[in-house]
């Protein structure tokens, strides 16, 4: 790996040269510019990983330089150097997006520490942007299929939100698999900040203390393993969006800090002493009834209202009229192409089954059902038999022998495993039975059970907890 390059912008030549020599000794490459104008000329050629710039420069001053650097490259960390008397300028610069400031006379140890931290931060940002690019293919609203009035209403609002530059917090609610993640990514991709970060974090994944460090970052020595300081996701998402998925799972102890970050737009790293301004917009999603939880006091009410300045509710698939068929056809083409199968139509009987099934796993479940059906199909017409919706296999990815028969929604045992509740069945109870069945089939292995259900492991864990099923 080649060494990182530091650009030092200072008209005090001797100081600039000795910093350069020191950094080269410490394993960095370094270049010097005597003015802001010179620094801008060098940016393209040097492509620095970190920039030190004096606040007071002949000609263009440090603050103006910072602004121009930001236009050129929004990510490169800039550290302002400041002599006694210009400290306010440096603080101002940090508010404008400078990474940090360094007081003169320069303490070389501090300089080294700051350089390491800044490099780490830009490395992390690059990594994250790599994941972002990989994880977020170009999305447009057109890819969210839905003609039903319920979906059109949501998409109409989403388009309006996407047109805004400074989007207030948006909470997307809806059952599992209704497309909450897809909608959030689409709003980002369709808006003016599509080139800015979109960082997803699953709030179920980590216990409170780790989550705090993940969101807000930590300073060196903040806890035993914190050998280096690290920026948090709020900072990494600077200028763009942070997507708090399963936000209902954020521990109460962290909810106050999250509220402050969103309301005051400042964060403090774990083990840190100063507040940092952040410019990050917040999306969050939940499949829980957070409003009710807020009324009951199990989720902070003030945080709920702050997260839900704009509330988008994605309807369950069973409330979307014929969208089931529209989506089924879309998946049919998609998986047909993927597996090289020439299935072109869905038989009338299969259509009926698709329309009458309650889709507890929503669009995700539908996509899995169609994927399997395409795999098993022969010829151009997809038939109801391929869908096998009333069997337990419909919720898994393979057909397995059912060795235990769970009670049906009406209490009685049903032959062939979990059946669809007849008429107005008790969906939650049916869902519980389906999950129990999947857990049994997977021998208690959560990862396998989640795969079979076509839901994430976190969602499964949440559901196990909700239904009081031993995991
Ligand atoms: N309207 C839609 N059109 C096309 N594909 C969709 C639509 N809605 C969802 N999908 C697809 O269905 C799958 C599930 O969507 P997504 O992961 O966004 O759901 P979710 O609501 O975030 O679920 P969970 O609560 O489990 O996290 C994804 O593969 C997504 O691309
Ligand atoms: Mg999701």
Image (spheres, rainbow, N blue to C red):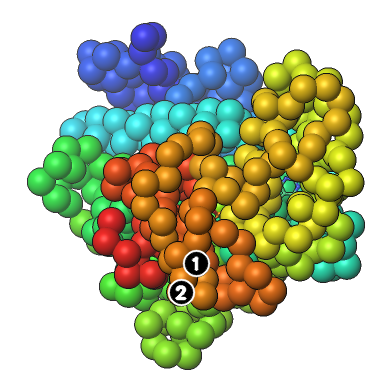
Residue at image location 31% in from the left, 36% down from the top? 117
Residue 420 pos. (x, y %): 61, 62
Q: Quadrant of residue 269?
A: bottom left
Q: Is residue 153 left or right of residue 121?
A: right
**Disc 1 designates what residue?**
408
| Residue appearing at x 42%, y 81% in the figure | 300
Between 446 and 436, the one lying in front of the other is 436
Callout 1: CB less than 8 Å from ligand 1: no
Give the structural element (helix, strand or loop) at label 1: loop
Q: Nearer the viewer, residue 206 or 197?
A: 206
Side (left or right) of 208 relative to 58: left
Spot the residue most to the front.
415
Q: Nearer the viewer, residue 423 or 246?
A: 423
Residue 169 appears at what percent x and percent y? 61, 67
Q: Is residue 415 visible?
A: yes
Residue 95 visible from this viewpoint: no
Residue that label 2 marks: 411
Residue at position x 45%, y 65% in the image: 413
What label sits on residue 176 in the rendered view?
A: none
Examine the rendered structure and indicate whether residue 212 appears above or below residue 294.
Answer: above
Give the quadrant of residue 268.
Answer: bottom left
At numbered mark 2, what does the secondary structure look like: helix, strand or loop? loop
> Which image quarter is the N terminus in?
top left
Q: CA distance from mark 2 to mark 1?
A: 5 Å
User: In which quarter of the view is residue 283 placed?
Assistant: bottom right
């Amino acid at each position: 790996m080649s060494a990182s390059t530091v650009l030092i912008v200072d008209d005090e030549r001797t100081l600039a040269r000795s910093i350069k020599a020191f950094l080269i000794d410490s394993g960095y490459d370094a270049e010097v510019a005597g003015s802001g104008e010179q620094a801008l000329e060098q940016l393209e050629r040097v492509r620095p990983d970190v920039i030190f710039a004096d606040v007071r420069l002949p000609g263009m001053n440090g603050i103006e330089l910072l602004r121009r650097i930001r236009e050129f490259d929004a990510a490169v960390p800039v550290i302002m150097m400041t002599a006694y008397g210009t400290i306010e300028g440096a603080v101002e610069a940090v508010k404008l997006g400078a990474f940090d400031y360094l007081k003169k006379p320069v303490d070389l140890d501090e300089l080294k520490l700051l350089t390491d931290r800044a490099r780490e931060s830009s490395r992390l940002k690059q990594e994250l942007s790599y994941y972002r690019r990989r994880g977020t293919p170009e999305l447009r609203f057109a890819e969210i299929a839905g003609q039903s009035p319920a979906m059109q209403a949501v998409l109409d609002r989403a388009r309006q939100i996407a047109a805004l530059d400074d989007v207030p917090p948006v909470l997307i609610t809806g059952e599992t698999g209704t497309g909450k993640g897809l909608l959030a990514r689409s709003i980002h991709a369709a808006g003016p900040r599509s080139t800015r970060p979109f960082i997803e974090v699953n709030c179920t994944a980590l216990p409170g203390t780790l989550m705090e460090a993940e969101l807000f970052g930590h300073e060196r020595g903040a806890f035993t393993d914190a050998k280096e300081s690290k920026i948090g996701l709020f900072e990494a998402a600077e200028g763009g969006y942070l997507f708090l998925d399963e936000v209902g799972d954020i521990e109460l102890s962290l909810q106050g800090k999250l509220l402050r970050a969103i309301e005051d737009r400042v964060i403090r790293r774990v083990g840190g002493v100063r507040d940092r301004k952040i410019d990050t917009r917040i999306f969050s999603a939940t499949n829980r009834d957070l409003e009710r939880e807020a009324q009951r006091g199990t989720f902070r009410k003030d945080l709920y209202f702050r997260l839900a300045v704009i509330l988008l509710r994605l309807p369950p698939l069973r409330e979307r009229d014929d969208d089931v068929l529209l989506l089924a056809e879309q998946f049919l083409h998609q998986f047909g192409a993927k597996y090289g199968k020439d299935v072109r139509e869905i038989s009338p009987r299969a259509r009926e089954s698709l329309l009458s099934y309650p889709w507890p796993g929503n669009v995700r479940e539908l996509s899995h059902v169609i994927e399997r059906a395409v795999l098993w199909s022969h010829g151009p017409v997809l038939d109801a038999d391929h869908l096998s919706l009333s069997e337990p296999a419909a919720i898994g990815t393979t057909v397995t022998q059912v060795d235990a028969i769970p009670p049906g929604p009406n209490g009685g045992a049903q032959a062939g495993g979990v059946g669809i509740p007849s008429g107005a069945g008790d969906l939650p109870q049916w869902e519980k039975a389906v999950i129990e069945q999947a857990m049994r089939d997977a021998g208690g292995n959560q990862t396998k059970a989640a795969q079979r259900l076509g839901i994430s492991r976190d969602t499964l864990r949440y559901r196990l907890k909700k239904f009081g099923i031993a995991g």
